[in-house]
Amino acid sequence: MVSRVSKFYEVKIQHHKMQEDGREKKVTEQYVVEALSFTEAESRIIEEMTPYISGEFDVVSEKIAPFNEIFLSDKRDDDKWFISKVAFITIDEKTEKEKKQTFRYLVQAATSELALDYTKEMLSHGMSVYCIDAVQDTPTLDVFLHEVKKEVVETPEENAADNDL
């Protein structure tokens, strides 16, 4: 499991999809895109989905995701996405009362039971007291993370060697 903290958007697209019986049906699909703005999220989803959809499709909805951290699995069978709702419990020093602060995490897993286990695993590294309130299935089909493009930079020695040829 790997954790990724960033700004995410839930983006819905609408397109015609061929059904098993040969008929076309208009469907709406939800994806999560890592982006800095609504404009970038829309651009990225168009770029990512164009090779997979024949014909036209529309971006019908974009909203800031209710989470800013994703738990990514490296297991092939973990092909679904779940929301883990976690309450972190603290004691207010002034009033000495218990306070709960709720966070949501998007978790990649095959089942809700595995998503619960993965959430516990990822939170076990911290020192905070927490309670997992819920693990829910989401309509998210895939997550598109921002890829860092590596630029090849030659050292002065490599550049000089190229000039000697």
Image (tube, rainbow, N blue to C red):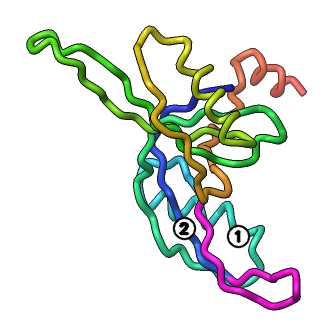
Which numbered dot is residue 12? 2
Residue 133 position (above or below residue 90):
below
Judge the density around disc 1: few (<14), some (14-19), many (≥20) Cα neighbours within 10 Å. Answer: few
Precedes in sequence: disc 2 or disc 1: 2
Chief secondary structure of the magenta span? strand
Identify the residue at image location x=82%, y=82%: 19
User: Is residue 55 or residue 10 the one in the foreground?
Assistant: 10
> Picture quarter containing residue 86?
top left
Callout 2, which amino acid? Lys
Relative horizontal placement of residue 165, taking residue 6 as reference (left or right):
right
- Secondary structure of the residue carrying numbered label 2: strand
Callout 1, which amino acid? Thr
User: According to the image, label 1 marks what residue?
Assistant: 50
> Picture quarter containing residue 151?
top right
Residue 37 at x, y percent in the picture: 41, 54
Residue 138 at x, y percent in the picture: 58, 54
Give the farthest residue toward the left: 94
Relative horizontal placement of residue 97, taking residue 49 as reference (left or right):
left
Location of the C terminus (image quadrant): top right
Identify the residue at image location x=68%, y=28%: 153
Give the farthest residue toward the bottom: 23
How far separated are the C-alphas under marks 2 and 1? Answer: 14 Å
Does the residue at mark 2 contact the one at mark 1 (Cβ under 8 Å)? Answer: no
Q: Nearer the viewer, mark 2 or mark 1?
A: 2
Residue 60 at x, y percent in the picture: 49, 75
Q: Is residue 21 magenta?
A: yes
Location of the N terminus (image quadrant): top right
Q: Is residue 73 magenta?
A: no
Please give the range of residues in magenta: 16-30
- Secondary structure of the residue carrying numbered label 1: helix
Residue 82 position (above or below residue 41):
above
